[in-house]
Image: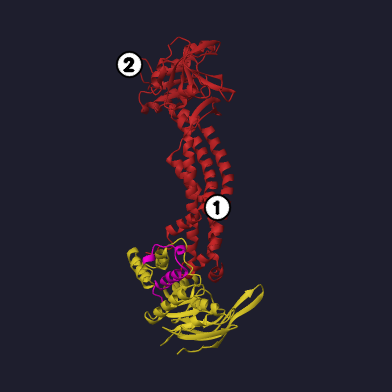
Amino acid sequence: MKTGLSFSYVARNLYARKLTTVLTAAGMALVVFVFATVLMMAEGLRHTLGGTGSDSNVVIIRQGSQTEVQSTITREQANMVESLPGLATSPEGRARISREVLVLVNMPRKGSGGLANVVVRGTTANGLEMRPQARIVSGRQFRPGSSEIIVGSAMARGNVGLRIGDSIAFGMRNWDVVGVFDAGSSGFDSEIWGDGEQMMQAFRRQAFSSLVVGLRDEGSYTGFVEALMRQPQIKADVKRERQFYADQSEKLANFIGILGKTITIIFSVGAIIGAMITMYASVANRTREIGTLRALGFRRGNIVMAFIQEAALLGFVAGAAGLFAASFMQMIEISTTNVQTFSEVVFRLVMTPGIAFQVLLFSMFMGILGGVLPALQASRLEIVDALRSA
Amino acid sequence: MSALISIRSLGKTYRRGNQPVPVLLGIDLEIAAGDYVSLMGPSGSGKSTLLNLIAGIDKPSSGTLLIDGVDIAALPENDLAAWRAANVGFVFQFYNLMPVLNAFENVELPLLLTPLGKAERRDHVETALAMVGLADRMDHYPNELSGGQQQRVAIARALITDPTLIVADEPTGDLDRQSADDVLNLLDRLNGELGKTIVMVTHDPKCAARARRLVHLEKGVLIDGGGEGH
């Protein structure tokens, strides 16, 4: 089998110039690190909001309101929805529906200062049962009909830092924190939950924000939506709960992605030039070697391939290093305002195999782009001239 | 013996800027298969250029150059590369080994262009290194070998594909007397025992004396030893 120049020859040439290789790879790795971090940020946000809610629940909001906070649903509309077919029922025979009220409350951020817009969700016993993923991890559940609240684990941990026993003032009342719940690192962990009817009174609300409906089974979704759309009293937007929250991550995730990719592209030009300089130096240092290989019968194509492989390997090494560094960013938790809902969301950076693959590919591509011109130059050398070089 | 190399009115002109610089003028030379020829002459006489043309790494400007009946100047580039790989072994003044490859891998390099499998390549390389007396240095890198040893590795590389022709450009130019003798003894064996045709460029008369035939060039013209060999 004709093998051409071996991969080991390529790799050892890179290793032979350890310092240059390490410095160039480090420059490229920084770009990879930035790129990976941005992708991990967008992925973390999607992961958090996409993991909120379940497919067997449906969220109903007023048509065009986009978020629960901006939506209003009247009691009459709520009663009508309750009578539609396809709803799950509790053991006592009551329809699984939770009339929820959402309010954004300003709370001071510790450390960084400023205010965070925290989602306060007034929910119901049904609402709690329909979200079994939200478990009390310390303290206890709020009592219905009281001014007690429970806080999501991210609100307990993060910048807002609420603790059991804290008393916080909003809606012209003081609310007592009695428990902390964890909803599996989802968006609910950035919320505060309390009794819906109490919140309605405190905020002098006549209408609910959203309805959360439990379906009898996942397949009854289409029938339920069609039945709802036929009702003249309500114009509503309906989505499965998981999709509803996943969609709320899109704007911010896309924004982070576009910003990150723009920065990465600009940085990568520098890294590509770095790779190019390194590869030109490699060609210049090995002119006689290239002439020798050609004399021995290796073709121009073999030489081009060898240098492109070398550049791609340089990119791969840089990619692996950048990825390794970026993997530590998974320990970072970000608390920021979701531009789509104007509410505080806390999420952790997430690395996925897809991101790792994308980043390595990008890094090798940077290497190859930097290597193409030097490789072509190497292959264009006349054998006699190359052999004569020192 | 029939002529392996047949050169007629061969000319080579380089361009320096717009100025044509003739290097070889109307060379006529025949070299028989199995011959051992030294090309001698002062610097700039064109001896290295003639060697490069014979080795197929440079193209003539005029005249014909047949090697074993093949007009190598007419071959397309990739065919010429394949021709070199199969028919020519190179020995350079500064050995030209790949610094990142050990002796074994340097010798194996030309075999990567052949259909030989790994095990066959290993057999060939071990035989060639044994022949140049370096069977115990296979794992050594060029910077771990003396100049003489490096040149012997290069000779093993030159004969690994069993070429008909070996070209050597000042093969002892960078070596001490003892190492130079070792290298020349080796070339004698390649010629005498294996029947390789050797064309060697040198300025060293002692070195040139090892050849069976001397060819002198001066200012691009053959002044002595041209025509049909003995």
In percent of width and height, residue A258 lies at: 56, 39
Looking at the picture, tell me which residue is in the foreground, A239 or A220. A239
**Three-letter amino acid code of the residue under disc 2:** Pro
Q: Which residue is mark 1?
A: A275
Q: Is residue A21 above or below residue A242?
A: below
Q: State the SS at label 1.
A: helix
Earlier in the chain: of badge 2 and badge 1, it is 2
Which secondary structure dominates the residues rendered in magenta?
Answer: helix
Other-residue count near label 1 (Cα within 10 Å), few / some / many at <14 / 14–19 / ≥20? many
Q: Residue at x 39, y 62 (%)?
A: B139
Q: Which residue is mark 2?
A: A91
Picture quadrant of residue A172: top right
Could you give the CA–CA distance between mark 2 and mark 1, rounded to whole angstroms? Answer: 67 Å
Subunit under mark 2: A
Q: Do marks 2 and 1 both belong to one polypeptide chain?
A: yes
Q: Is residue A43 visible?
A: no
Q: State the SS at label 2.
A: loop
Question: What span is in magenta?
Answer: B136-164
Pick the quarter of the image with the N terminus of chain A: bottom left
Looking at the picture, tell me which residue is in the foreground, A94 or A146. A146
Q: Is residue B43 visible?
A: yes
Looking at the picture, tell me which residue is in the foreground, A53 or A190. A190
Chain A, colour shown: red
